[in-house]
Image (cartoon, grey):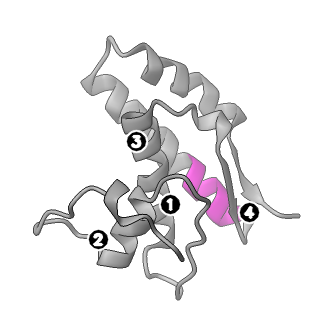
Amino acid sequence: MKVVKDMIPTKPHDVIWTDAQWQSIYAKGQDILVAAAAGSGKTAVLVERIIQRILRDDVDVDRLLVVTFTNLSAREMKHRVDKRIQEASFKDPNNEHLKNQRIKIHQAQISTLH
């Protein structure tokens, strides 16, 4: 994966993400592919990427296309994104963008290819 380094924030020493995960979360101006073994944190990385795009870039969740291999993982990912949006909205109740995301999550394209 080609990553534009100057667009990625510096990784703090106390974060849980590996360098590759950090780059996947914060890469901009490109599509990404997260491929790794089962249980390695793919879903967590994608959820964090989605949340950071919503919070940092004011992207609408229904403007993203997120594809995974199983219906179960797609449902789990959508549930986690919804939960994180709700948590962020409760912390910042006057944020209209977050309020809108709570509605738009239901139209978000988090699914499989079939």
Residue furthest left in the image: 13
Identify the disc placed on residue 17: 2
Residue occupying the point 58% across, 65% down: 32
Amino acid type of disc 2?
Answer: Trp
Q: Horizontal placement of 73 versus 28: left or right?
A: right
Identity of the amino acid at label 3? Arg
Q: CA distance from mark 4 to mark 3?
A: 20 Å
Q: CA distance from mark 2 to mark 3?
A: 17 Å
Front position in the image: 6 or 106: 6
Please determine whether, in this image, residue 58 is positioned above or below residue 49: above
Task: Tell me the element at label 3.
Answer: helix
Quarter holding residue 72: bottom right
Could you tell me the amino acid type at mark 1? Leu
By secondary structure, the bulk of the magenta-drawn segment is best described as helix
Q: Which mark is residue 46?
A: 1
Nearest-to-viewer mark from 4 and 1:
1
Is 74 in the magenta? yes
Q: Is residue 22 left or right of residue 10?
A: right
Residue hosting label 4: 71
For the C terminus, the quadrant is bottom right
Q: Secondary structure at mark 2?
A: loop
- Residue identified by numbered label 3: 84
- Secondary structure state at the residue bearing disc 1: helix
Vertical position of residue 95 compared to residue 72: above or below: above
